[in-house]
Structure formats: C-alpha cells, structure tokens
C-alpha cells in the first residue's frame, strides 16, 4: 500500500509541502507562520477559511464591477458609433466654396 501524497517540511525555511507521489507535483504549500502546531490545530484552518471566503467575496465583487462597466460601454456604443459616422460624413462631404488643402 502506498500513499498518494506526502507531507514534507523544508529544512531551510520550515515550509510544509504536500507532494503528489505519482506526479511529483506540489499540491499545497503552507508557510511556517500558517503551519498548524499541535496545540492550536483548528485556529490556522479557520484563518485560512476566512481569508479564502474574503478572496471569493472580493473576486465576485470585482466581477460584478467589470460586468457593470461592460454593460455601460455597450449602452454608450450606439452614440459613439453615431458620432464617428457623423465625423466621417462631414469629412467626406465638402461644403460649397471650400478649397481642398
């Protein structure tokens, strides 16, 4: 029986790494400040959970902001195109009495 992943502690920086044995890929990395100690095993997990929730909230809020910005751009697109068309038409049509440069 072999384990699918192993936990390793770096001797230089004390970072805990979880490594997949089959692919040799690092699955998880916990810096020493976040590494759970035996006395307070539940506290760091709760902190990580709270920070993950905060990141998700921020990500969804920024997504809503980007969507609103894109919708606002779409709403104004018709007017921008009309203005560009009008400028091009004025450039193309010369008024009587104007000399070409």
Image (spheres, rainbow, N blue to C red):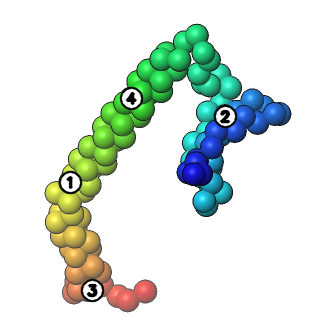
Indicate the secondary structure of the residue bearing disc 4: helix
Picture coordinates of residue 13, whole percent (x, y) = 78, 31
Q: How far apart are marks 1 and 2 (CA)?
A: 45 Å
Q: Name the residue under label 2.
A: 16
For marks 4 and 2, give the one nearer the viewer: 2
Q: Which element is circle 2 on?
A: strand
The residue positioned 39% from the left and 29% from the top of the image is: 54
Mark nearer the N terminus (1 vs 3): 1
How many marks overall? 4
How many C-alpha atoms fall within 10 Å of the one at disc 1: few (<14), some, or many (≥20)? Answer: few
Residue 71 is labelled as: 1
Do the numbered discs 2 and 3 sit on residues whose CB atoms are within 8 Å? Answer: no
| Element at label 1 | helix
Query: Disc 1 or disc 2, which is closer to the eye?
Result: 2
Taking the image as shown, residue 5 lies to the left or right of residue 101, namely: right
Label 4 sits on residue? 54
Q: Which residue is rendered at x = 72% and y = 34% of the image?
A: 9
Q: Residue at x 62, y 25 (%)?
A: 35
Circle 2 or circle 3, nearest the eye: 2
Badge 4: how crowded within 10 Å, few (<14), some, or many (20+)? Answer: few
Mark pair 2, 3: CA separation: 69 Å
Q: What element carries label 3?
A: helix
Q: Which of 73 and 13 is in front in this view?
A: 13
Cα–Cα gap, marks 4 and 3: 55 Å
Quarter of the view holding residue 55: top left
Density class for disc 3 (Cα within 10 Å; few <14, some 14-19, many ≥20) is few
Q: Do tag 1 and tag 4 residues touch (Cβ < 8 Å)?
A: no
């Amino acid at each position: 029986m072999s384990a699918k992943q192993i936990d390793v502690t770096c001797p230089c920086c004390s970072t805990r790494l979880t490594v997949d044995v089959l692919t040799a890929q690092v699955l998880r990395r916990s810096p020493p400040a976040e590494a759970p100690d035996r006395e307070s095993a539940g506290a760091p997990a709760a902190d990580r959970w709270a920070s993950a929730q905060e990141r998700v909230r921020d990500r969804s809020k920024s997504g809503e902001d980007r969507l609103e910005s894109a919708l606002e751009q779409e709403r104004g697109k018709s007017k921008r195109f009309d203005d560009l068309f009008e400028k091009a038409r004025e450039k193309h049509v010369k008024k009587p009495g104007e000399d070409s440069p």
